[in-house]
Structures are given as structure tokens and as C-alpha cells.
Amino acid sequence: MGTSAGKVGGGTGAAPWVAQDPGAGAGVEPGPEAILFYDGTCGLCARALRWVLRWERVDSGLYFAPLQGRWAVDRVPEVWRTPPLESVVLWQASGGEAVSVRTAAVRGLGPYLRRPWGGTVGGLGAVPWVSEAVYRVVSRHRHRWGEAEACDLRPPGLRPDQAARFLD
């Protein structure tokens, strides 16, 4: 579970950092299949979330939560939710819990997006070292490209169906 890009954890059983729902299997509705975790105080991240919301498939089932929230504590390794936050994180439950970070997380959004972006985003990283270098530069300077006080843990102007998929 180092800080390398790509998937961290996974397998067929629950990952050790995933808190199990004590009521699971006792008539409790299962949780989200995929959660995109983001820096809730980053203006560039808020704009990126609005872009994802604009282009996501109607049936995507993708949920959203800030890295500063309680959902992240239960599902994201501490290294990825400890400041300075340096990555978007995609948590997926299908086939056993897995966490993808940096460009792997961005590529992992492909199946949740409509054309033309699903294939385009999914194909990012054809030259992994280049995409990782670009991601790190953007990550390092993202607060300069978006006013922190202009954003919230939840982007403004969400439709009710979108707001229902934002976790805290």
C-alpha cells in the first residue's frame, strides 16, 4: 500500500482499510459500488467534479465524497487522505474493494462517462510516465487555479438526483 500510482489493495475479500457495515446482510441496503473521492477545498477539483457530473452516464451509479469526510476514513488509506492531498481517489467495490489513485483513478472513470469522454478518459495513460508527470504538476499547483474560498465540500447547483449521490 505504498504511494505508487495505480491500484492499491484489492482482491476478493474486504480490504483492511474498508470498514464493514455492521448491519450488512441484515436487511440493510448495500452501499455505493463506486465513490470518487476528491479534495473538498480545491477549486480546480470542484470544477472537475462539475465536468464529471455533466458527462456521466445516466445510470453511472457513481457517488462522490470529499477526502476530508467520514466516508474517506472508512475506505481510503490514510496516506491518500492526509494533507497535502495529492490525488483524486476512485474506490470500487465490485470484485472486492480496490482503490485507484492519480491517473489510474482518472482512467477508472471511463466506464462511468458518456461518449466521447468515456473512451478518451479510459485511454489516458498510453505513456504512463508522461501522464503521471502531468498529473503531479497539476496536483501540485491546483490550488493556484481555483480559489479555495470559492468552493465547498459539495459543488453548488446540483440537481436533486446528483445531490443524493454526494456523501460526507
Image: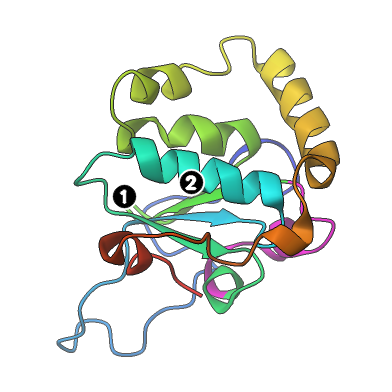
| Crowd tier of the residue under label 1, counting other residues whose Cα lies within 10 Å: few below 14, some 14–19, many 20 or above | few
- Residue 167 occupies quadrant: bottom left
Question: Do residues under tags 1 and 2 come within 8 Å of each other at their CB atoms?
Answer: no
Q: Is residue 80 magenta?
A: yes
Q: In the figure, is residue 158 to the left or right of 128?
A: left
Q: What's the residue type where badge 1 is placed?
A: Gly
Q: Is residue 82 above or below residue 87?
A: below
Q: Residue at x 78, y 22 (%)?
A: 133
Q: In the figure, is residue 156 to the left or right of 67?
A: left
Q: Residue at x 77, y 32 (%)?
A: 138
Q: In the figure, is residue 122 to the left or right of 43?
A: left
Name the colour scheme: rainbow
Number of the label disc, if any, that sits on residue 147: none
- Residue 137 occupies quadrant: top right
Q: What's the residue type where badge 2 is placed?
A: Arg
Residue 100 in sight from this viewpoint: no
Give the magenta part as a residue range. 74-86
x, y percent for residue 147: 77, 52
Q: Is residue 42 above or below residue 75?
A: above
x, y percent for residue 73: 61, 74
Tag 2 or tag 1, which sits nearer the N-term? 2
Gap between marks 1 and 2 measured at Cα: 28 Å
Task: Name the residue that disc number 1 marks.
Answer: 95
Query: Depth-wise, is mark 1 or mark 2 nearer the camera?
Result: 2
At mark 2, the secondary structure is helix
Task: Name the residue that disc number 2 marks.
Answer: 50
Residue 133 in sight from this viewpoint: yes
